[in-house]
Image: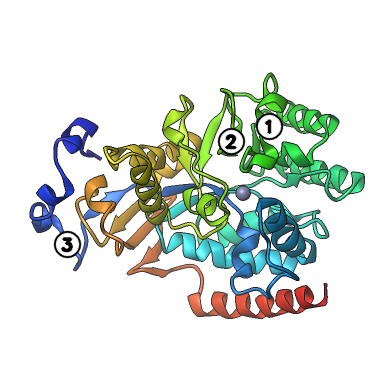
Amino acid sequence: MVLATASDAAATTVADRAGEDLAGEDTGKGSGITPGLVCAHHHLYSTLSRGMPSPPRTPSNFSEILELVWWRLDRVLDLEMVRWSAMLGALEALQAGTTVIVDHHSSPNAIDGSLDVIADACAEVGIRALCCYEVTDRNGPGAVEAALAENRRFLEAGGQGMVGAHACFTLSQSTLEAVAGLADSLGVGVHIHVAEDKVDSGAGGRLEGIAKPDWLLAHCVHLDRPLPGMVVHNPRSNQNNAVGYASPSRFSNPVLLGTDGIGADMLEEFRIAYARLREDDVTAIPAVPWQWLENGWRLAPIALSDQVRWNYAPIDPWHLAFTPTVRPLEVVVDGEVVLRDGRPVRVDEQEVRSKAREQQARLFARLETL
Ligand SMILES: [Zn+2]
């Protein structure tokens, strides 16, 4: 795949390009082809949360968003809800051309076996998942042991993924060391939220000397020092939580793109990443966030063997940054067509959506009783 280079693109304004290349557009049968896209930071367990009952009061900062929204939601999840949340999330990922989801899971009252449920749901739909379970001290020592055990059990059984950790501000030093030690012993990295908000601004100091190049560092908005690892930028989630701009161009680490649970439409996340980058620097070009998207293949090179045929060509950052209607027509994973004419082949879309709605109703009913 050949993309416009940064120097090519910088010399040409959007207005200059508005009248050219349109002959390359082919919305009828499509001819733009890419490998499968990678969502480098997702929370499939949040898929059913759309439209959830309002929290007891309006959260006014990031800590309250966690306490009043997400930490109430994850506590009421059972494995059936986890399954259909993952099925719907995987379906929508496939329909957006995303064939690898790097998931970060939490269901503190349904820990054991949860990673298998997510991996199996993704496989059933026909996409790939790199799973982890979120270790945190916020649910007490029993939950720490169960979370570590779930990561170990899943990975030792051949599951694909990493060891998960919430964030330094909910991890004691001994728990953080246990996470790092487990990852070391299993030969994988740690997938952890890093300095997403000011409340976790001490993360850099905590992780210095512990983090390694195979760690996945989500957010890094307030990271105050270099750390080894891959940085995952989640532009829309960061805006939604008003935690600030991560300025990912400042990192020398590989920067990847994630959604932090708001779907898995990576072309959309690329466009948002571009808009946010541009707001910060009007000379910035879309080749920069496109590179962040492509860096997903460094983390999950298996996606390079997948193929997505889009309803649009050319696959060019300047085009895609300004074309919000680009959708996959066909997706091939592991040699198998899993999306044809925009529809999933392995599962019935209406059935998945219907089952997900049933579980969503159960979830909302439980939230109402909290
Ligand atoms: Zn996250």
x and y percent of residue 299 in the render?
50, 36
How many C-alpha atoms fall within 10 Å of the one at disc 3: few (<14), some, or many (≥20)? some
Q: What is the three-letter code of the residue carrying label 3?
A: Asp
Tag 1 secondary structure: helix
Foreground mark, 1 or 2? 2
What quarter of the picture does the N terminus occupy? top left
3D distance between C-alphas at marks 3 and 1: 47 Å
Residue 72 as seen in the image, left or right of residue 25: right
Residue 369: in sight, yes or no?
A: yes
The residue at which mark 3 appears reads as 26
Q: Which residue position is annotated with label 2?
A: 222
Residue receiving disc 1: 203
Residue 45's spot in the image, x, y percent? 65, 60
Q: Please determine whether, in this image, residue 103 is positioned above or below residue 351.
A: above
Seen in the image, is 243 located left or right of residue 155? left
Task: Work out whether mark 1 precedes mark 2 in sequence or the reverse, and give the earlier one.
Answer: 1
- Identify which residue is drawn at 46% across, 52% down: 99
Q: Is residue 136 above or below residue 189?
A: below
The earlier-in-sequence mark between 3 and 2 is 3
Q: Residue at x 85, y 51 (%)?
A: 139
Is disc 1 surrounded by few (<14), some (14 to 19) or many (20+) residues within 10 Å? many
Q: Position of residue 83 (x, y in %)?
A: 67, 65
Find the distance from the CA under tag 1 to the CA under tag 2: 9 Å
In the image, what residue occupies the spot 72% across and 69% down? 55
Q: Are marks 3 and 1 in contact (CB under 8 Å)?
A: no
User: Crowding at label 2, few (<14), some or many (≥20) Cα neighbours within 10 Å?
Assistant: many
Residue type, label 2: His
Q: Secondary structure at mark 2?
A: loop
Task: Name the kind of residue labelled 1 in the image.
Answer: Ala
Task: Assess whether mark 2 and mark 1 are in contact (beta carbons under 8 angstroms).
Answer: yes
Q: Quadrant of the C terminus?
A: bottom right
